[in-house]
Amino acid sequence: MQTIQILPEVIDAALCDRVRSMWSEKLSDDTLRSWAHRVQRGAASHEFQCVELDEAVWPYVDDPRAEKGTCRPRILRYIGSAQNQGYERHVDNRGYGERDRLVSLVVMLSDPSEYEGGALWIEGYGEHRLPKGSVIVFPSNHLHSVGKITAGYRYVANYMWVGNV
């Protein structure tokens, strides 16, 4: 996989809402507030398990080296207003022991009307603000960032698959 795939609204909006509710049910507001102050780079996150979403996104992983079941998906919540959270430029393929992260996949769990700012920027492919249920797949070694959220909340599910290079 050498290019990005942008797949508008391929995940059912009701499934996106169920995944977002997992965030709310799992963590209290006090926990979220304390995490938001401590999280490096600006987004509070937590690992989650949602087999339905895992199965829905796997067909879009276009790299035969990626191994199903090797991903630890995370839900990320970016907070606008005074928090003004974003995520600085980075690559995803580092720091996973002896194996490399190969494929990154982001599921938009929020609609852009729910927040201001927060575009996903991928080097060579520009900025993207996609509707709820959209998926972006890209090689984990591509430089990318999330612009600052100036209002509202931006939720995404983030997957990174590993494999042997």
Image (cartoon, helix red, strand yellow):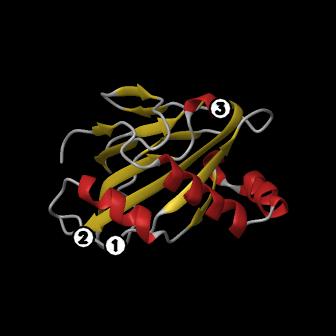
| Residue contact between numbered discs 1 and 3, judged by CB atoms under 8 Å | no
Residue 144 drawn at (x, y percent): 42, 38
Mark 2, residue position: 67
- Out of 14 and 159, give the one closest to the viewer: 14
Mark 3 or mark 2, earlier in chain:
2
Mark 1, residue position: 70
The answer to which quarter of the image holds residue 7 is: top left
The answer to which quarter of the image holds residue 151 is: top right
Dot 3: few (<14), some (14–19), or many (≥20) neighbours within 10 Å?
A: some
Q: Secondary structure at mark 1?
A: loop
The amino acid type, in three-letter code, at marker 2 is Glu
Please indicate, yes or no, whether residue 95 appears anywhere in the rendered image.
Answer: no
Q: Is residue 152 left or right of residue 33?
A: left
Q: Residue furthest right?
A: 30
The amino acid type, in three-letter code, at marker 3 is Tyr
Dot 1: few (<14), some (14–19), or many (≥20) neighbours within 10 Å?
A: few
| Residue contact between numbered discs 1 and 2, judged by CB atoms under 8 Å | yes
Residue at image coords 50%, 56%: 15
Camera-nearest label, 3 or 2: 3
3D distance between C-alphas at marks 3 and 2: 34 Å
- The quadrant in which the C terminus is found is bottom left
Residue 32 drawn at (x, y percent): 76, 58
